[in-house]
Image: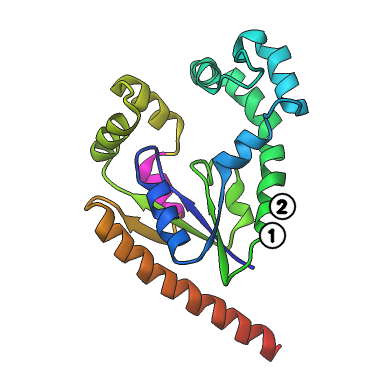
Amino acid sequence: MFRVGLTGGIGSGKSAAAECFRKLGIHVVDADWAARVVVQPGKPALEQIAQHFGAGVLLENGELDRAKLRVLVFDDPVERAWLETLLHPLIREEILAALEQSSGPYAILESPLLIESGQYQLVDRICVVDLPEQLQLERACARDENHKAQIRKIMAAQLKRQARLEKADDVLDNSAGLPELRAQVETLHQQYLQLVESARHSRLQH
């Protein structure tokens, strides 16, 4: 199965691009979904998180208070590293299982931390959704109703724009909005179908 990793910074429009691929019939595995699955009530990871950070990171219904945990780890690189060491291997397992269940010509792994977490090793190609950082900041603030300081903190914790672009095989420019993004996705979709077909021919010849 040919796999494409789809990534971009907060507010870049990564989820919108993923939805465009879904509408073309492509199976999309969301790394954020996998991250939620591994910390569901009853899962060992949630128990370890509660023991480490205290019961204050749990909601009344026993679920993880993701907003509270995010504040704790964003302000402390040591705690963030502890959490990533615990969760990244578990998330990777969930992603792999979901990718292996994919049908269709190829699959998409949508992940905000595709490069930072090493998840890019699970894919054949990296597609970055990109836009200028000021526009990224404005859209993220408008969408999440967050303060600019909080969004800047999240952006600082993510890979820098230039470093992300350097890793990209393909780039979707989302500065012009959804209709233009949709058109770019459709073009890229055709290119991916051609790559899949070329790989299939190559295998048959060998």
Which residues fall within the magenta stretch? 160-167
- Position of residue 94 relative to residue 106, above or below, is above
Residue 175 in view, yes or no: yes
Q: Quadrant of the N terminus?
A: bottom right
Residue 69 vs residue 154, the one in the foreground: 69
Q: Is residue 30 magenta?
A: no
Estimate the x, y position of residue 160 in percent, counting from the top left.
39, 39
Q: Which residue is mark 2?
A: 97
Q: Which residue lies at the image location 34% right of the left edge and 26% below the top edge?
A: 152
- Position of residue 116 relative to residue 130, above or below, is above
What's the magenta bit mostly, secondary-structure-wise?
Answer: helix
Circles 1, 2 touching at the beta carbon (< 8 Å): yes
Dot 1: element: loop
Colouring of the image = rainbow
Report how many numbered discs are placed on residues in the image: 2
Q: Which residue is mark 1?
A: 101
Taking the view exactly as shown, the residue that stands out farthest to the left is 176
Judge the density around disc 1: few (<14), some (14-19), many (≥20) Cα neighbours within 10 Å: few
202 relative position to 43: left or right:
left
Judge the density around disc 2: few (<14), some (14-19), many (≥20) Cα neighbours within 10 Å: few
Q: Quadrant of the C terminus?
A: bottom right
Amino acid, disc 1: Gln
Q: Is residue 162 magenta?
A: yes
Estimate the x, y position of residue 30 in percent, counting from the top left.
55, 47
- Position of residue 193 relative to residue 146, above or below, is below
Residue 93 vs residue 131, the one in the foreground: 93
Amino acid, disc 2: Ala
Q: Which residue lies at the image location 63% right of the left edge and 55% below the top edge?
A: 122
Taking the view exactly as shown, the residue that stands out farthest to the bottom is 205
Estimate the x, y position of residue 125 in percent, counting from the top left.
52, 62
